[in-house]
Amino acid sequence: MFSPKRKMFLLNLLIALSLVAAGTAVPSMQAAAVSTYPNMQVTLSANNVNAWAVTVYAGKPLIFRAKVKNIGNTPLQVTANLTIPYNWGVPQNKYSDCPDSLAVRSSCTISWYFIPQGSGQLTLRVYVRGNYKDSAGNAQRITSSPAMIFNVKPARN
């Protein structure tokens, strides 16, 4: 009665509908909605390039940023830490425009300024923490620790 392709399609459709009905999955139009629990999205960039790996040159300024978006259901107090790589010059302290309480659906950015001195490959991992109070008033936190690979080439003349 049905071809094998049609049977597979119908089976997948039934599975998808049952997951939606059970609340395990949500239709894609709702996926962008705010979570029903505390959550954040962290996006890394280097010199305004959003990628998992970038190439930079020793002796050239580098701006490394972590953009934090509150996609949860409660305001967050955002902090971020980064271990400074050996042989990377740091001309100024990190800068954060994150408020004391990052509202739901809002974003903020933490920036680090470097001047890599040596060449080679390394990974920078940012540890981001979102502190909040649960419904009972207890302090809680969520964390994220994305990373970016840097290919540092020798200085260009």
Image (cartoon, helix red, strand yellow):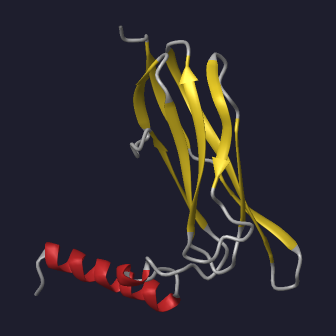
Q: Looking at the picture, does residue 140 appear above or below residue 56?
A: below
Q: On the rendered image, what quadrant is the N terminus found in?
A: bottom left
- Locate residue 98 relative to residue 115 in the image: left or right: right
Instruction: Place residue 109 in its image quadrant.
Output: bottom right
Q: Where is residue 16 in the image (x, y as percent from the top left)?
A: 37, 81
Q: Where is residue 11 in the image (x, y as percent from the top left)?
A: 29, 80
- Locate residue 116 relative to residue 26 in the image: left or right: right
Residue closer to the observer: 114 or 9: 114
What's the residue at 64%, 16% (across, down)? 87
Q: Looking at the picture, does residue 79 appear above or below residue 142?
A: above
Would you say residue 107 is visible in this rendering? yes
What's the residue at 42%, 83% (across, down)? 30
Q: Where is residue 81 in the image (x, y as percent from the top left)?
A: 71, 44
Instruction: Place residue 97 in its image quadrant.
Output: bottom right
Q: Position of residue 25 (x, y in %)?
A: 47, 80
Q: Which residue lies furthest to the top in this view?
A: 157
Q: Which residue lies furthest to the front in this view?
A: 92
